[in-house]
Amino acid sequence: MKKIEAIIRPSKLETLKAALNALEVRGMTVYNVMGRGLQKDVKQFYRGQEISVDLFPKVKVEIICRDHWLERIIDVILKECSSGQLGDGKIFVYPIEDIIRISSGERGDAAL
């Protein structure tokens, strides 16, 4: 099993959810986060003072999947979330040792 963490633009979340739903990927956890990468800071004015904004709003999507689904899910994320511009985000993949469903005690694939 694998854990996919995708940091994406907030404007891409609904499109990604619809595409994953079409792929029958139902389970996910979504967080609102702030981050920075290669994007340059943006100068803004607040109460007459110039400030530099270098943390940008992003959405973090976490998905746990079976190994054979990994590349299909990554392909969907890339297709739906890429604009070709800096700031599109990143995808991280981690191995998952075990999953336990709290309500039933099921483990492994059965708990997905």
Image (cartoon, helix red, strand yellow):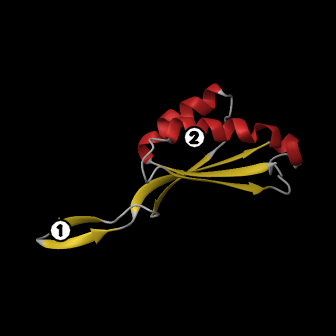
Q: Quadrant of the C terminus?
A: top right
Is the residue 6 above or below the residue 69 in the image? below
- Is residue 35 toward the left or the right of residue 96 in the image? left
Residue drawn at point x = 28 percent, y = 70 percent = 52
Query: Would you place residue 17 above or below residue 42 in this image?
Result: above
Distance (Cα) linking label 1 and label 2? 36 Å
* Crowdedness near tag 1: few (<14), some (14–19) or many (≥20) residues, C-alpha within 10 Å: few
Of residues 37 and 9, the one nearer the viewer is: 37
Q: Secondary structure at mark 2?
A: helix
Horizontal side, residue 71 vs residue 34: left or right: right
Q: How many marks?
A: 2
Q: Position of residue 7 (x, y in %)?
A: 54, 53
Q: Is residue 42 visible?
A: yes
Q: Quadrant of residue 48?
A: bottom left
Instruction: Using residue 70 as the reference point, say whether residue 79 is left or right of it.
Output: left
User: Which residue carries the number 1 mark?
Assistant: 46
Residue under circle 2? 78
Q: Amino acid at mark 2?
A: Leu
Q: Position of residue 74 (x, y in %)?
A: 65, 41
Q: Residue furthest front?
A: 84
Q: Is residue 106 visible?
A: no
Of callouts 1 and 2, the N-terminal one: 1
Q: Nearer the viewer, residue 103 or 23?
A: 23
